[in-house]
Image (spheres, rainbow, N blue to C red):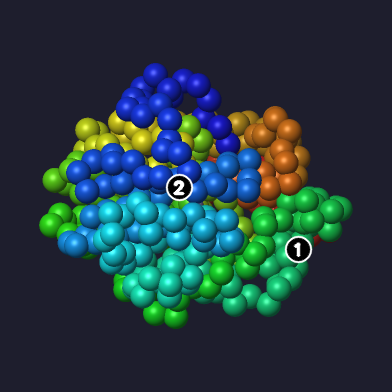
Amino acid sequence: MNGGEREATALRFPYAEPPPAGTCRDVAPGVRWLRMPLPFALDHINLWLVEDGDGWAIIDTGIASDAIKALWEHIVADELGGRKVTRLIVTHFHPDHIGLAGWLTERLGVELWMTPGEWHHARQALADRPGTFGEELADFYRRIGFGDAQDTVKSGRPTSYRTLVSAVPETYRALADGMELAIGERRWRVVIGRGHAPEHACLYCPSLDLLIAGDQVLPKISPNVSLWPRAADQDPLGSFLASLDKLERAVPPSAFVLPSHNLPFYGLHARTRQLSALHGERVAEVVAACGTPRTGAELVPILFRRTLDRHQLGFAIGETMAHLARAVALGQLARRERADGVWLFGRA
Ligand SMILES: [Zn+2]
């Protein structure tokens, strides 16, 4: 989902370009930025190195592929000034963030640090019998009103987790909300966000006034907030909006923000407010469209007017359902079940 052009004016981007592939750029004292390619419409992820005593802590990994492994080999050999890697910190379980956690921790002999919620999600996604989630998704899409569920599942299913994540370590060190983490000489505070992922870790360093934001706040695109089958959180958008408010309380507006996608920026509170407003408008749009009861399938093209590729369609369906779930949680819409099992959303 794209937040449009209006936000650009409120945000300030000190770097016009990312560092070239395979190189690092200093963005703050003891903090380095590097980029890895992704094989999607969103074609990159930003990763960070934080000085940790006599070495560097890695934040997030990129997806599992030979090309990304080769880039890491090059970075470890040539870009760290001969210093070692001390640990791996992962913000959340999505494949572009955790894909090489198993390989990197083993290759470098370091520990993984992440939240329990994200670690369990990653382990579960990897352990799933192939096809299980696909079957659940097919049933979910049928209830949303895609009669041709098989075709929709095939075209809308996110790329298989196993193809993008090599392994998730069996043990890890737990990050928790509000925890003070010493990385080298500096202290970082863990700020947990929800809605995009179950227990997403952001890291704020007060002495640098710098936030490693992961996917919780992005400057150009809005972080995907989807309702999926078997979701423990049935109102992920409500959780996401509450997390934006919490970030505003936890991190000052002056903070330099390092997001996982697009460019580092200033203007955190401007961006959290834009995202809140954008989702509020979209909830109002689905409520307005449900004057006559509608299925989720009928609402997808109302929220997403542009053409969607295979990867984007699944996320568009998930986002539409998250906005409907928010409207239901607010008491503005009610969900009923048609005789054929399809959900209908109408005015409460
Ligand atoms: Zn993510």
Which of pointers 1 and 2 indicates the residue nearer the eye?
Answer: 2
Q: Camera-side residue: 246 or 50?
A: 50
Q: Camera-side residue: 97 or 283?
A: 97
Residue 257 lies, in percent from the top left, at 32, 39
Quick check: can you spot residue 29? yes
Q: Residue at x 58, y 73 (%)?
A: 126
Instruction: Check contact, mark 1 vs mark 2: CB within 8 A.
Output: no
Numbered badge on residue 22? 2
Residue 214 lies, in percent from the top left, at 40, 49
Decide: is 55 above or below 225. below
Q: State yes or no: Cβ of the residue under disc 1 lies below 8 Å from any atom of ligand 1.
A: no
Q: Quadrant of the C terminus?
A: top right
Q: Camera-side residue: 71 or 219?
A: 71
Residue at the outermost bottom position: 170
Which amino acid type corresponds to the residue marked 1 in the rendered image? Asp
Q: Quadrant of residue 340?
A: bottom right
Q: Which residue is mark 1?
A: 139
Quick check: can you spot residue 202? no
The count of marks equals 2
Q: Earlier in the sequence, mark 1 or mark 2?
A: 2
Question: SS class of the residue under badge 1?
Answer: helix
Q: Residue at x 28, y 39 (%)?
A: 27
The Cα–Cα distance between marks 1 and 2, rounded to whole angstroms, is 43 Å
Q: Residue at x 70, y 30 (%)?
A: 306
Which amino acid type corresponds to the residue marked 2 in the rendered image? Gly
Q: Quadrant of residue 300?
A: top right
Numbered badge on residue 241? none
Q: Residue at x 79, y 56 (%)?
A: 154
